[in-house]
Image: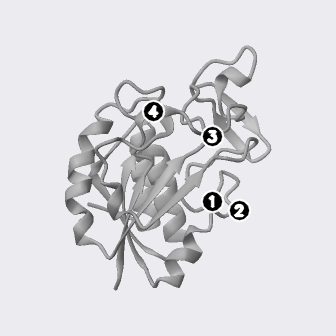
Amino acid sequence: MPHALIVVDLQLDFCPGGALAVAGGDEIVAPINAMMGDYDAVILTQDWHPADHSSFADNHPGAAPYDVMRMPYGAQVLWPRHCVIGSSGAAFHPALDLSRAELVVRKGFRPTIDSYSAFFENDHATPTGLAGYLRDRSLDRLSFAGLAHDFCVTWSALDAVRLGFDVTVLEGACRAIDLNGSLRAARGAMRGAGVTLA
């Protein structure tokens, strides 16, 4: 069964020194580069927000980063400003081997809705187009790596299972934010949905 590696949001703003840094986020670059040759396809996702994005805490007077706000599509964590379109922080980590990537899926570019998953916006309904690409190429088996384990990687893996893909999360090639126990909850949700944690 053709097997794709999906590398989630390995961008400078999510690495140490970035605006929304994940501890150890840069440690997974070399292992991910080393495994790329083991897959039939490599796909990258890229968080790509306009400056007026509704998920940025500083776009809501009186709000603080990590507050939770109700949006039309549900609860939304308000994040520090990050991965703004065209900014240096939105760039992929410079050591990531971009030459192997056959597709880059940009997400989060709609100002009024966030997008953790590689497959859907946070309304769970607006598609990114990734599922169609994978099906057109008969890539039915997916392995996920990247940042952050407990948000964008988990949401992507859960959506992939729901869409009928065979899904593995490579935990050694992920790092988590772990906001108020979010990593434990994410792992439980993935196991319950049938995601293989490797």
Badge 2 marks a residue whose secondary structure is: loop
Q: Earlier in the sequence, mark 2 or mark 3?
A: 3
x and y percent of residue 141 in the render? 38, 76
x and y percent of residue 47 in the render? 54, 45
x and y percent of residue 18 in the render? 42, 27
Residue 195's image quarter? bottom left
What's the residue type where badge 3 is placed?
Answer: His
Q: Mark 1 points at which residue?
A: 120
Q: Mark 2 points at which residue?
A: 125
Position above or below: 79 against 43: above
Please state if 45 lies on the left or on the right of 24 as rendered.
Answer: right
- Marks 2 and 3 sit apart, C-alpha to C-alpha, by 19 Å
Q: Which of 16 and 177 is in front in this view?
A: 16
Please state if 173 lies on the left or on the right of 142 as rendered.
Answer: left
Q: Which of marks 4 and 3 is nearer the N terminus?
A: 4
Q: Quadrant of the C terminus?
A: bottom left
Q: Name the residue under label 3.
A: 49
What's the residue type where badge 4 is placed?
Answer: Asp
- Marks 3 and 1 sit apart, C-alpha to C-alpha, by 15 Å
- Marks 4 and 1 sit apart, C-alpha to C-alpha, by 22 Å
Q: Which of marks 2 and 1 is nearer the N terminus?
A: 1
Residue 11's image quarter? top left
Q: Are marks 2 and 1 in contact (CB under 8 Å)?
A: yes
Q: Which of marks 3 and 1 is nearer the N terminus?
A: 3
Q: Which of marks 3 and 1 is in front?
A: 3
Please state if 53 lies on the left or on the right of 171 as rendered.
Answer: right
Q: Which of marks 4 and 1 is in front?
A: 4
Disc 3 residue crowd, few under 14, some 14–19, many 20+, Cα 10 Å: many
